[in-house]
Amino acid sequence: MAERNVLDRRTFVKGMLAAGATVTVAACAPVATPGATPAAPVSQPTVVGPAWIHPKSLVRAQPGYGGAHLTWKYGDTVKWLPPMDFPADAAAASFAQLPKSKLQTIYYLMVLGSIWENGIKDIQLAGKDTLFGIHHGAGQEADQVGVGQALQSLPNLPDLVACNMRHHALGLARGQNVNTLSAGIWGKTTGATKGYASYRQSDVKNGFYGPLPLIGLGWQVATGLAWSCKVRKSGQIALGMNGDGGHATRYFFSAVRSSANYKLPVVFWGANNFQGVANPCATWVPSPYLADMPAGLGFPCSVVDGNNVAQTYTACKEAADRARSGDGPSVVESLTWRWYDHSGNAGAKIGVDGAVGLPYRTDDEVRAWLGRDPKVRYANWLLAKGLFTQAELDAQKAAAQKAFDDSVAFARSSPLPIGPEGNVGMWPDYTAPAMQFFEHTVRTTL
């Protein structure tokens, strides 16, 4: 009974924040036993933000965007605009040691993802093709490709990924073929989902589960996948990727808490583009950063520059290695930016990057973030380090453009689906009963 009357630290902090208080928790010292030797004080880690690895504390030394509430103004995201050049940090030093072939693949996939996103936007705006709607991920290539390439891709044992939307570069980085990706947006049988499921193209053969239709659901699907990896002792891990809005759902904390309880091999990756659908996350996040919300659960929670592929790759690799070694989950918040509207092409123009004139962000803000194009930042870093020549990078751009053009031709020439074919081959070695197409008897008794 006595334990029920003890107020734990997390409940205390949440209550104080709800009451509008400013709370700093330096340490929670145990009650001293009479006659016992006092324990030596534990020094608190120095925090340098926003690109840090989580100190074991609930409080950040560097203030964030969270808790701004009604003081937040449209355009304030420029306060978190990263420098154009990659900082000479540990992530960049580690990333530079990757084989040249790996660095080239990452650049190619980032360029291909960008060309695909902007090319599909132009085709949709031209209005000559019938395509599914889309949630564009342009501008988030460093985030998606860095994560996708940091995970294990062994044949038959790939790491497992669950996500929601803006997933196209992530799918390519996890092994999806660009022809399949384009055929899917045209709704053709040669797409990953055989012309069904809208633009949401899962590819389970490459461990790509999603994108899922409910915002935030990727957290719980990733938790279930991680449980499967742990039970099967397969050596795989799972990663859930969602946007900032996904942190406000019922799925987030329950998934993170359960993963901590069972030390599941999972990474929770939050791609924070600040905007949600149209509501800045600063108006609903009480903690300085999204990653701070589960910090009291005792595992690493970090924040990285999501437009810096050296940081996204390195952070994901560290979190994946931790999960694979049996140390349990991690949370990573990646500060990035989406170039277009939440969905569709409002404010977009053919041949022009970025959407302007949207009511929930300023055009100056858009232009500032366009100036931190992750592909350009990465290319500049590769050139400055002497790892690639401009001619080599141009060759990768040309190859990516050709791959996109070929994929469009492939999609346009592919057949449309017919009726119940949609239930065949969606999962390996399994055919779902076609009850949605034919009359069937509903069993009402056991």
Image (cartoon, helix red, strand yellow):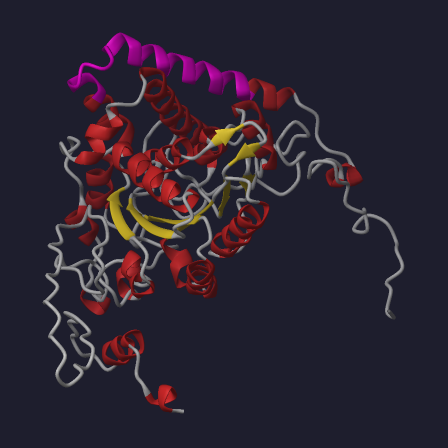
Foreground: 421 or 131?
Answer: 421
Q: Which quarter of the picture shows residue 184?
A: top right
Quadrant housing residue 309: top left
In percent of width and height, residue 220 lies at: 51, 56
Residue at horizontal 10 percent and vertical 61 percent from the top: 43
Pick the residue in front: 283 or 393.
393
Check if residue 356 falls in the magenta segment.
no
Q: Which of 256 and 122 is in front in this view?
A: 256
Residue 113 appears in the picture as rendered: yes
| Residue 393 within the segment the image draws in magenta | yes
Relative to 67, 113 lies left or right: right
Q: What stretch is highlighted in magenta?
A: 382-408
Give left or right: position of 259 versus 356. Answer: right
In the foreground, 290 or 348: 290
In the displayed structure image, the side of residue 175 where residue 373 appears, left or right: left
Q: x, y percentage for residue 229?
A: 54, 46
Residue 346 in picture, x, y percent from top left: 40, 44
